[in-house]
Image (cartoon, helix red, strand yellow):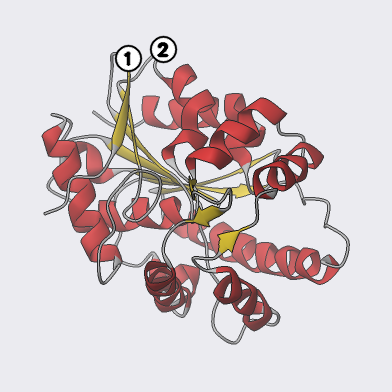
Amino acid sequence: MTLLHAHDYGGDGPPLVLLHGYARSLTDWDASASLLTAAHRVLAVDLPGHGRSPGVSPWTIPTVVRDIACTLDAHGLPEAVVVGHSLGGLIAVEYARANPERARARAAVNLDGFWWRPDFPGGEQVCEGLLASAGAVAPPGYIEQQVDNCVRLGIPADRAQTAIRAAVRPLPDGTWQTLPSRAEALDVLDELHRLGALGVTTWLDGVGCPLLLVQAGRRQPPAPGTEWFDEFSARFAQVVSGELAALSGTRPTIHVSRIDAGHPMILETPEAVATLVAEFVRELPG
């Protein structure tokens, strides 16, 4: 059992636990969490090997789900609805699948957390980039470069800087250790490939609880030289949209929504994210 680093934002009402994306930290949730406390008790958690949480070996989703459950028990919140962004969204669904006995775990929110099949065009090139950067030591100007990238996407500079600093570890020579470590990052990618190989429809088989599945509705402007990634993202989003539309038409527990933001929606439009999550939880039975 591993207790994960968590931040209790307080609040009163049905409890929520917030999970972040790959190579990020719970600090990404600061702005949305402060809004959600108006009607909820809110806890955010650093995934293993991210932020200030200890690492695990091997890094597997069943292990992560178990550690989240132990962490929620330690905070007296065994019945929290799990809300995740990106990698955290996939884990939120897996947490609900693994914990049907936890009353409030019978619902989950996945904010743009989807992965592609191994043969999806362009996927191999994306994975090559992720493998090359996994666990890398970033140069001294890394923070400033990342802030500039975020500002280009409409994210306020102060919010971006706080979130980026929380997701890396400073080294004595002024460089930055990106997280998770390379070994853990490779495990994460293996788990994503395992789930992605199923396809969205098959992946969601057997999850009978209410699910809110959200896609980013805005395409991010590509950085120079990465136009191919913009095309890849658009094609993949279209495939996911088709599967989600079909699922929502046949499974009343699946709720599909789109938000007017890019993939980093919890940093870009935290107010819209908080509103969407609060409305979904308010309508849950019981």
User: Residue at label 2?
Assistant: 38
Q: To which residue does mark 1 refer?
A: 11
Identified by mark 1, the residue type is Gly
Q: Position of residue 144 (x, y in %)?
A: 71, 41
- Mark positioned earlier in the residue sequence (1 or 2): 1
Q: Is residue 116 above or below residue 218?
A: below
**Rendered location of residue 9, percent (x, y):** 35, 21
Q: SS class of the residue under badge 1? A: loop
Q: Residue at x 61, y 28 (%)?
A: 272
Residue 116: image quadrant is: bottom right
**Location of residue 280 (image quadrant):** top left
| Snapshot quadrant of residue 242 | bottom right
Q: Nearer the viewer, residue 26 or 123?
A: 26
Q: Are marks 1 and 2 in contact (CB under 8 Å)?
A: yes
Work out whether residue 275 or residue 263 is closer to the camera in this orientation and state it: 263
Q: Quadrant of the N terminus?
A: bottom left
Note whether residue 156 is visible.
no
Check disc 2 and report its element: helix, strand or loop. Answer: loop
Q: What residue lies at 44% left-to-right and 70% top-to-bottom?
A: 182
